[in-house]
Amino acid sequence: MSAPGFCLRHLVFLGPQREPAAVAFGFGLNIVYGASDTGKSFLVEAIDFMLGGKPPLRDIPERVGYDRILLGIETYAGDTYTIFRSIEGGRFLLYAGLHTEMPPEGTEARVLGEKHSERNADNLSSFILEKSGLAGKWVRRNKWDDTNSLSFRNVARLIIVTETEITDQRSPLSDGNPNTDTPNFATFKLMLTGVDDSALIAGARATQEDQKREVQAELLDQLIADYRDRLKEMTRSPKELEDQLGRIDASLQSQTNQLGASESDFRRLSGKRRELREKLEQGEDRRAEVASLLERFDLLDRHYLSDLARLRGIEETGTLFVVLGQSFCPLCGAEPAHQNRDIDCDGNVDYVVAAARGEIAKIDLLRAELIDTVANLRGEATAFDRSLPRLEEQLRAVSSEIETTVSPQLARMRSSYSNLADKRGEVREALTMLRTLQDVEKRRALLDRDAEDQKGKSVSDGDLPTTTAEKFAQQVEAILKAWHFPEADRVFFDRKARDLVIAGKARTARGKGLRAITHAAFTIGLLEYCRAQETPHPGFVLLDSPLLAYRAPEGREDDLRGTDLNQQFYDYLAAQGSDRQIIIVENNDPPEDVRARPQVTMFTGNPHAGRFGLFPIA
């Protein structure tokens, strides 16, 4: 008899004007690795989305132009199906067979709702649970033994672990919401034992106070769910918001100093450019004025020369008349006998000659002054002819520095500062939302404690049989030993903390990298335990960044780079049987021999070598 569950065969993004973006998977070990920002984590989110995760998918630029997704699955009994969903969310279409492109119009398809319902099996959750051997199961909802129909979303967090979740400082059975801890643990117990909580009989709320408390709890639960959804839209790492805000504030302070220096340089150079431009304009105006004056003075000098020539002609002619003696008057034509030389008149040649000489002397004086003025103006013009080109060159140099260096740099810095300020606003908003969520969660926990105090005893929310807990811990211990995990010889399951204790130290007390690898061991251990005990399990796990301690250890205790755990991790997973599927998404490269295996996909991040990423370059 074939094992329950199914494996993923392909995920394909389709768009009317875009090249399909497809990733293929097979039975056993699958690895997707490569550069950052190539879509690896988005691949994990998209798979979860196609298995009933809440929309919307994270909005990344690369997904623009794609409007639908196809997820191919194959059961271990050999049946194949393709699940279709709009990238915006909503209901699903289920096609028989594996399709990497949209089936022809008219192909028979079953419509499946996106929400689980115990009354109607026409939803994706019921379909997947049926293929996983978990259909019709019930799990405890709260400490009063109320039960809910099992949804695949209860199972999903135990098999699909994101990069954020794998390093969380809490149990793999907790998502941080006290309201969901009970059904999460009940689902874990169901998968280990194969026994659900359908036999439980809900306890009665004896008092009005209990009913009021329950109403308050439901309201707080709804608020917690809403705040969680909104926080998920704002950030993928809520616990890092404080550090992120500190880094942004530090960057903003540095940017402020640099921006101040750049603006100071811009103001200084702009002032210098303005000063040079004013000097150049004044110089050009004065040079034009000097040129105009020189033209006018040249014309005036020609008039002076013309007047001098005329006056010297009068002087010379008058002198000749005086020398020639008695003759007809050159002015009035009177004969010598009729001339009155003792009376001043126009005919007095001596007087005219004297007047001409006086005018000549006056014009010579004026012309001498004019020559001095013209010489000064020509000297000033020569100085401007030398200085103006230098001013123009200086102005061009300053303008070029402003336009090609200072201004673009200032624009970039202002844009960067604006983006950082916007990001700080978003982080502050998310941080406020996180604190509000934490406050509501505390109030919810206080409400539960108050309910226990009112009853006078602790109310049980279920427990795991000791034998089962020990067997599960031994399974995880065997995995950690096979991986050569340090000090993996003492592993047990703390039923109170609902988490592993390894070598006497709680799993959550370790560094981020060790929390990641031990979370991976927990998830894979659950799959192997269910297969060994023949209890229901979907048959696949998907882990994002389990080997963080190999890539970015937090400290010496968290550093596994000096061990062979990386090699042993992949060797162990590669040896797993064909009745299960393990998908690993990693940043760092697997060992060379592992990279040569089939079902290994590399995202290079290089548009000129190999596959760039999840989405082809537009």
Image: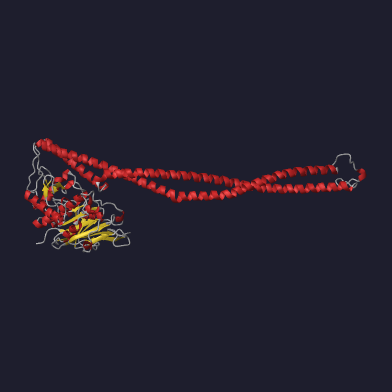
Q: Considering only vertical position in the picture, is 193 above or below 107?
A: above
Q: Considering only vertical position in the picture, is 365 above or below 106?
A: above
Residue 211 shows in the view: no
Q: Considering only vertical position in the picture, is 42 above or below 331?
A: below
Tell me the residue at 33%/62% (across/down): 608
* Count of picture labels: 0
Quarter of the image that includes the N terminus:
bottom left
Is residue 343 rendered to the left or right of residue 309? right
In the image, residue 399 lies at what x, y percent? 48, 49
Depth check, front residue: 395 or 83: 395
In the image, residue 60 lies at what x, y percent? 29, 53
Tell me the residue at 23%/40% (across/down): 436
Residue 130 shows in the view: yes
Depth check, front residue: 511 or 353: 511
Q: Residue furthest right?
A: 337
Q: Considering only vertical position in the picture, is 64 above or below 451?
A: below
In the image, residue 610 lies at what x, y percent? 29, 62
Is residue 349 rendered to the left or right of residue 447? right
Indicate the quadrant where residue 18 lies.
Answer: bottom left
